[in-house]
Image (spheres, rainbow, N blue to C red):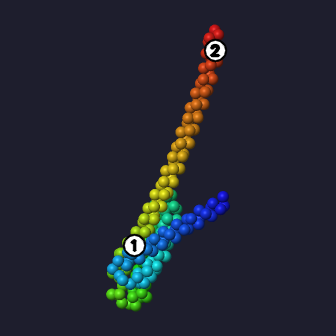
Amino acid sequence: MKSELIFKKILQITLHLLFWCGVLLFYTYFFGTESNDLGYVLSFSMFLMPITIAVTYVSIYKLIPEYLIKKKYFLFALYSAYTLIISSYLIVISVFYGLIYLSNFVYADMPPISRNLLFVSVAVYLVVIIVSAFTLLKLNLKHAEKTKKLETKILETQLKLKEQELNYLKMQIHPHFLFNTLN
């Protein structure tokens, strides 16, 4: 049992690592479309990864289960806004990082897509939204499965109750029928 739990955790961590490697490849492709400097693009993408990972995990492990699923919509909106503000600030810092450290203060050396805050934000929040939507879908499927099991259990219980009522009525009919036939 314990080894099965360890295997599941290792599998989950492996899947997460593979997913984040895929996101890194997406960022590298997305930010490198009009650039020949692979080193810049890879460094810029690597700098965005902790921001994306943090925002995604805050969303799927904190905001969605604790506030959205439990119907605390005001707190969900409030903490989502906080997360958005903090992550936007970090995205701006990442663009400045690209300008200062990767381009040596030469704005023209930056790839066009990494200069634009809108494109950088879209790339980060696209990943967050897709992962959050997948998480909501997964939670919804679990809830639907749980509801179906409960409905099945209720129907089985109702069927057993009806069978017991029928058996009770049969037991009442038999003595009266026998008594009436004897008279």
Q: Secondary structure at mark 1?
A: helix
- Crowd band around label 1 with a 10 angstrom C-alpha radius: few (<14), some (14–19), many (20+): some
Residue 83 in sight in this render:
no
Q: Nearer the viewer, residue 84 or 134?
A: 134
The total of numbered circles placed on residues is 2
Left/right placement of residue 138 relative to residue 119 reads: right
Q: Which residue is mark 1?
A: 123
Please state, as top left, top right, bottom left or bottom right, where the N terminus lies in the image.
Answer: bottom right
Residue 177 image position (x, y, % from top left):
61, 15
User: Dot 2: within a 10 Å radius of its alpha carbon, few (fewer than 14), some, or many (20 or more) residues?
Assistant: few
Residue 69 can be seen, yes or no: yes
| Rendered image: mark on residue 43 | none
Q: Is residue 80 above or below residue 48?
A: above
Residue 86 coordinates in the image, percent (x, y) = 45, 75
Q: Residue furthest right?
A: 2
Measured as percent of width and height from the top left, residue 64 is found at 49, 62
Image quadrant assignment for residue 38: bottom left
Q: Are marks 1 and 2 in contact (CB under 8 Å)?
A: no
Secondary-structure class at tag 2? helix
Q: Quadrant of the C terminus?
A: top right
Q: Could you give the CA–CA distance between mark 1 and mark 2, rounded to whole angstroms?
A: 83 Å
- Mark 1 and mark 2 lie on one chain; the one further toward the N terminus is 1
Q: Reply above or below: 32 against 73.
A: below
Horizontal and vertical percent position of residue 140: 48, 55
Q: Which residue is mark 2?
A: 178
Residue at (55% x, 41% y) in the render? 154
Q: Amino acid at mark 2?
A: Leu
